[in-house]
Image (spheres, rainbow, N blue to C red):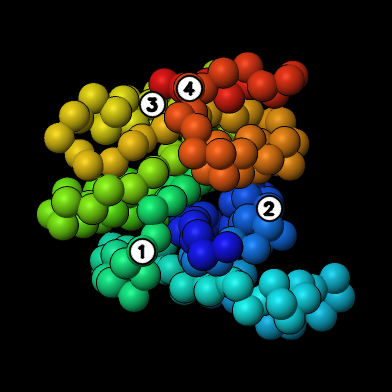
Amino acid sequence: MDESVFIISQGSRYGKKIADKFLANNYRVIKTISDQESEISENSTAGGASPETESMLTEISWNYRSPFSSKNITISLKNHPDIKNFIIVYSIPEEDTPIYKQSQIEIQKIIDLYIKSQISITCEFLNDFSKNNRSANLFLVLENSNSNNPFREFFKNFINTILGDDTLPVNINAFEIGKEPPDPFADYVFSIIQDKKAAKGKWFKQFRYTLF
């Protein structure tokens, strides 16, 4: 199979399971990986992927603290001009301590890592698609989207703005997921892309995937 998928993830368990699902079905996968993830991958030998699977996987280092790194990820698209499927996983953190009880340093760290970085990479991709009139299937996955997450509404508003832009040459599907196991969701995303179906956002078995 010649199809490929580009996965933007910050070490998310959903991003990993989605990547594993496509690799297991002979898709070529281009996946972002942080420096920390890269070190773990290099030092881990037990339970690793087979050589055949590894040959289908391309990992691109993404320092999500740097907007310049997001720009470099977009530039890397030129090396993969035939990719039509893109999945961006918004890894919103689950916080045990309410945001208002955290220090200013911690609040700024959360904003830098989980707000600025993900907004930046999404905007870079959309601007590139629009500039080059590049058609694509874009999946935006909002992880840990629970009612007590202080960033949930911010991301929903941002994604709704994208969904409302009819000028983008992109088929956009946006979902929010809570604490559901990642495997069924990975199967669901795979089935949509494999069967060339239009995702509608729905109740899928007992797992809630909501289209904004």
Marking on residue 82: 1
List the residue tagged with mark 2.
21
Quadrant in the picture for residue 22: bottom right
Image height check: is 171 above or below 89? Answer: above
Instruction: Identify which amino acid the numbered label 4 is placed on.
Output: Lys
Q: Is residue 34 visible?
A: no
Q: Earlier in the sequence, mark 4 or mark 3?
A: 3
**Regarding mark 1 in the picture, which secondary structure is present there?**
loop
List the residue tagged with mark 4.
200
Question: Left or right: where does residue 113 sit relative to residue 181?
Answer: left
Q: Earlier in the sequence, mark 4 or mark 1?
A: 1
**Regarding mark 3 in the picture, which secondary structure is present there?**
helix
**Front of the two marks 2 and 1:** 1
Residue sitting at 38 percent across and 26 percent down?
156
List the residue tagged with mark 3.
156
Question: Left or right: where does residue 156 sit relative to residue 149?
Answer: left
Instruction: Identify which amino acid the numbered label 3 is placed on.
Output: Lys
